[in-house]
Amino acid sequence: MAAEAAGAFRRTPIERSDQRVAWERTDQAFFAAGACHILAWVCRGSYPDRPIEIAGVRPAGEWQVFHVYATWNGWAFDHSGWNPEPQLLAVNTEFEGRPLEAVTITDDLAGFCATHHSRMPGDYWRDPLPRAHDYVNRHRPPWAVHPPSAPGQPAHLPLELREGEGAALGRRQPQGVGHLPDLPPQGP
């Protein structure tokens, strides 16, 4: 599944005020807006043998994140499944129409929820953890999908970012995204 902007799934006023209505949205909409942080922490907990981190996206220079996702070796997992992190950031930057930055989140789930005024699992209409586990299990992680790279090529990079293995991005990383390095220019 291609990366989609979280903002495309923003909750309506009724979805914000009625937890049951919010719960009844599609899984993708639910985990894009309103429970993205739950999905990120479940993803990390589902792969304890992998160094999965949690990251958030926020407007450049602002404090509050508006979307949370899991990261592993240049890949991001959110409501769109696993995608190269630069693609996730690019679609969100384009949708929002302003510079965004990615930040690493070091709090545990409870600390994050307290700091960012987000819901803990017990604050939803129903327990979102089984739904999040099911969603994570529907998406094959990149280490199970992509073969090791050729000698001299970093194995952790997505195929489309490896030299000579495609130019799917065809553009540089958007400005203002934060801690990610610039991508090399792609073809003519």
Image: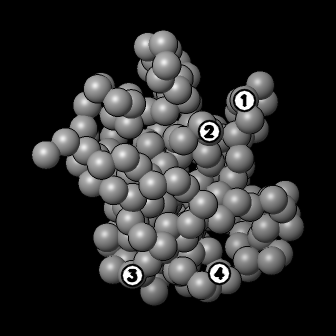
Say whether marks 3 and 2 touch (CB < 8 Å). Answer: no
| Corner quadrant of residue 57 | bottom right
Question: Is 56 located above or below residue 71 in the figure?
Answer: below
Residue type at numbered disc 1: Arg
User: Could you say which disc has been placed on residue 72 in the image?
Assistant: 2
Pinpoint residue 146: horizontal percent, then vertical percent.
Answer: 44, 20
Label 2 residue SS = strand
**Residue under the image location 46 percent in, 83 percent down:** 14
Q: Residue at x 56, y 75 (%)?
A: 58
Q: Give neighbour class at mark 2: few <14, some 14-19, many 20+ (Cα, 10 Å).
A: many
Q: Position of residue 93 (x, y in %)?
A: 39, 70
Observer-nearest residue: 13 or 49?
Answer: 49
Pointer 1: what residue? Answer: 50
Q: Secondary structure at mark 3?
A: loop
Residue to which mark 3 is pinned: 98
Residue marked by disc 4: 64
Q: How far apart are the alpha carbons under marks 3 and 1?
A: 33 Å
Which amino acid type is shown beneath numbered disc 4? Gln
Residue furthest left in the image? 188
